[in-house]
Image: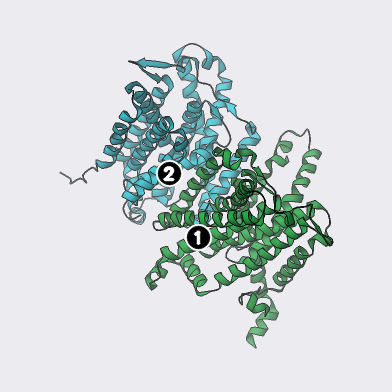
Chain colours: A green, B cyan
Amino acid sequence: MIARLLSFDLPRSRLLAAALVLVFVGLAAAPFLFPGSKPLGVAAKMLVFILLVASYDLLLGYTGIVSFAHTMFFGIGAYGVAIASTRLGPGFGSVAVGLVAAIVVSLALSLVVGLFSLRVKAIFFAMITLAVASAFQTLASQLSDLTGGEDGLTFKNPDVLSPSFEFGGFDGRLIVYYGIFVAVVVLFLVLLRIVNSPFGRVLQAIRENDFRAEAIGLRTVVYRTLSNVLSAGFATVAGALLALWLRYTGPDTTLSFEIMLDILLIVVIGGMGTLYGAVIGSVLFVFAQNYLQDALKLAAGALEGVPVASAVFTPDRWLLWLGLAFVLCVYFFPTGIVGRWRAAALRSPETTTRRRA
Amino acid sequence: MIPQASFDWRPPALALGLAAVALPLVGSPSTWLTLTVAGLAMGLIVFVIASGLTLVFGLMDVLNFGHGVFIAFGAFVATSVFAGLNAWAVAPDLWANLGAVFAAMLAAMLVAGAIGWAFERVVVRPVYGQHLKQILITMGGMIVGEELIKVIWGPQQVPLPLPETLRGSFLIGDAAVEKYRLLAVAIGLVVFAALLWTLNRTKLGLLVRAGVQDREMVESLGYRIQRLFVGVFVAGSALAGLGGVLWGLYQQNVTPQIGAQVNVLIFIVIIIGGLGSTGGCFMGALLVGLMANYTGFLAPKVALFSNIGLMVAILLWRPKGLYPVTNR
């Protein structure tokens, strides 16, 4: 049953299995285990990032394409819900309209960008997505009538999902949290299904050797574009979920390049080419982001007055440490946490004897 | 007589055509002249920045997403030099002003070149031949560099005012042509000519061109392409630093994000020109500069997408860029 649900892509490492169970239980029970609004916010962000990063891993880890436009699709989802809710008034109808419209826009845009740039060279795709994403970011801040510009949009959720709603001990925020939880679990399982399907195998074949894949008779352009479109679709849903949770959408929460960097870092830390890496990476990263920045603040306070160190250790330079961590991870840790754990599990004597038997 | 490949005139004709089409749309010839000079200045600055990137790609198949960081370092070094040579920069004497500008350029090229050398050593060298890692690592290097700039010069925007005698503009008929833009055009043309001369008339340039065409063949003839590559990388970084000074003076202020902003522009340029092609890079830069200025005047809201639109149009016409490099 569980194996079926996981599409027979089992963790293949006891440590990983234990960590996944821990994450699942922890996030499922987060509102009761860690009461308070900050921990719940962190948990919700973890959930959204799990979906977002998993969808990016479909592109980077499984198909071997670097895109810098993933936050664009994330943003389209968030803005879709926000714009529909402000224009049409709060309600499930407007959320649905916004989500559907956003998905349509994302799919069309990713199809065009993909068909256009994936037929030439993978490196083209990275550059073109960077250009398109930065143009989109400027567009979002220019069209301030629609998007609220730099300030973003604050909107109201449907009544049932608003914090003031009470129903037998559950308030609206908890309902949103569990809605996100269920959506992320289901979509994650769908993604797992996709990467373990024959289609997913083709993507991995293209990643390993696109020339050979083409020689076998696979239309690599078509598969790459499909992978791009799928991943954009999932990212859009993740954006919509984030918007519902925050009841706010702005450039800083969805479109900024910093978030793109976060996604890249999580994929690399967790492990490229395994969706479980997205889970482990997101949980660790979001935790670190929310609690390590406080530690940096403490370090900066302690180092106050020391000339260079205080400039380097301020929380404002968080991105410096992120960038360094990213470069070091790509060098020394290319398979990520999940890759390490799985390799360790393969080496351990117990499994080798079992294999021999 | 050595048979020569015939020169493809259609891309330059395209640039002239673009300028010709813009004339009736803009309306007044004097405004058109101002815009055209501005476009050429911008194009030449972008060319100075992008030429190194396209050569590095052509020679070693390395795409450096961190190229923008050299631009930013160049521009910030210029602010420091101007602060140091304040007396020269504010004196109402053309030669003192030019001295300050050239001192800033020299310092920027030295610093950017040195950083480029370190960047190649630390960041790029370990990931030769691995495209995916290259993109990720150089992007990471870019972020780290940008943050280091914020540590050194602070995160805020720094003004980079033009020296006294370079402000204002000449009047040619009714058209106002900013003095600095003429200087930028002149410097850009000098760099272009020097680059063409080096590439086409020296042994070094011959090896670089041969390496772009077929690296293994050059290696098998006994040349150390690795050293050549380091040289091109450092030279490209130094040119980016020079371009950073020009760009900073063009904008009259410098922000740490300047590198990331210009990065997008130069990617568009080298894609338009054909990855690895110097001539294509030149034409692409001119087209982008002209296009940005014309659309900025005619339809400011559309200007954001004009460059991407241009890229799309050109790639539909020639999928590998204006001057495709063989075997890439």
Residue B55, given in percent of the width and then of the height, sits at 39, 44
Amino acid tagged 2? Ile
Q: Which residue is mark 2?
A: B308
Does residue A87 appear anywhere in the picture? Answer: yes
Is B115 on the left or on the right of B233, as rendered? Answer: right
Q: Position of residue A303 (x, y in %)?
A: 78, 38
The chain under label 1 reads A
Q: Nearer the viewer, residue B84 or B134?
A: B134
On screen, residue A86 above or below A104: above
Cα separation, mark 1 vs mark 2, equals 20 Å
Q: Quadrant of the N terminus of chain B?
A: top left
Task: Decide which of B213, A225 is in the foreground and name it.
Answer: A225
The image quadrant that residue A20 belongs to is bottom right
Q: In which image quadrant can residue B25 be found?
A: top left
In-front residue for pair A324/A119: A119
Q: Secondary structure at mark 1?
A: helix
Q: What amino acid type should be assigned to the residue bearing mark 1?
A: Val
* Residue B312 % position (x, y): 39, 47
| Residue bearing the label numbered 1 | A229
Front in this rendered view, residue A96 or A238: A96
Q: Is residue B232 visible?
A: no
Mark 2 element type: helix
**Quadrant showing the C terminus of chain B:** bottom left
- Disc 2 residue crowd, few under 14, some 14–19, many 20+, Cα 10 Å: some
Q: Which residue: 52% across, 44% down? A: A134
**Dots 1 and 2: beta carbons under 8 Å?**
no
Residue at 37% x, 45% y: name it.
B272
